[in-house]
């Protein structure tokens, strides 16, 4: 199954606050993606690493700049694997097993 959707790619950078403590800041960019199904083999391989693979998406390679987080359909995911195919990058999205998602 494939569908077109919008995804927010989230980059995190570490900076120092006013008293010198490290804080994480986030910047997000929105782009168009094609949502793909997660294959059985992908699901099994990710689960063995303690991840729950929830979606795979394809974005234009110029839209992806190495971000480690993404938001799709209002849910925040880790980008745990990437794969470039021609002009597109496949991003595999998931959460750590046991992690509470939502709210």
Image: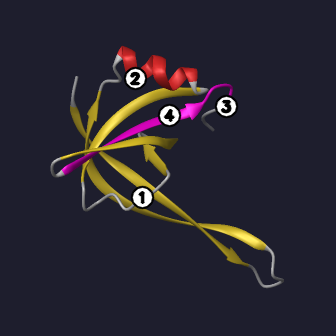
Does 63 sit above or below residue 103?
below
Kindly indicate the quadrant of the structure image that contains residue 93. Answer: top left
Check the picture and name the quadrant holding the N terminus: top left
Task: Locate residue 73, reporting x and y percent.
Answer: 41, 39
Check the picture and name the quadrant holding the C terminus: top right
Q: In screen coordinates, is 23 left or right of 50?
A: right
Q: Nearer the viewer, mark 1 or mark 4?
A: 1
Q: Earlier in the sequence, mark 1 or mark 4?
A: 1
Q: Nearer the viewer, mark 4 or mark 3?
A: 4
Q: Residues within 10 Å of mark 1 (few under 14, many from 20)?
A: few
Q: Earlier in the sequence, mark 1 or mark 3?
A: 1
Coloring scheme used: secondary structure
Separation of disc 1 and disc 4 at Cα?
16 Å
Does 80 sit above or below residue 23?
above
Q: Earlier in the sequence, mark 4 or mark 3?
A: 4
Magenta segment: 88-99
Q: Badge 4 is on which residue?
A: 94
Q: Badge 2 is on which residue?
A: 42
Image point (61%, 33%), residue name:
101
Q: Badge 1 is on which residue?
A: 66
Q: Residues within 10 Å of mark 2 (few under 14, many from 20)?
A: few
Separation of disc 3 and disc 2 at Cα?
22 Å
Separation of disc 4 and disc 3 at Cα?
12 Å
Separation of disc 1 and disc 3 at Cα?
25 Å
Report if residue 24 lies within the magenta region. Answer: no
Determine whether label 1 and label 3 are within 8 Å by CB. no
Image point (63%, 26%), residue name:
97
């Amino acid at each position: 199954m494939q569908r077109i959707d919008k995804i927010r790619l989230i980059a995190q950078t570490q900076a120092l606050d006013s008293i010198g403590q490290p804080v994480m800041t986030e910047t997000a960019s929105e782009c168009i993606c094609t949502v793909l199904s997660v294959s059985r083999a992908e699901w099994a391989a990710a689960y063995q690493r303690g991840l729950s693979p929830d979606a795979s998406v394809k974005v234009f390679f110029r839209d992806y700049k190495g971000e480690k987080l993404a938001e799709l359909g209002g849910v925040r995911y880790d980008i745990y694997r990437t794969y470039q195919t021609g002009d597109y990058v496949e991003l595999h999205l998931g959460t750590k097993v046991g992690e509470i998602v939502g709210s």
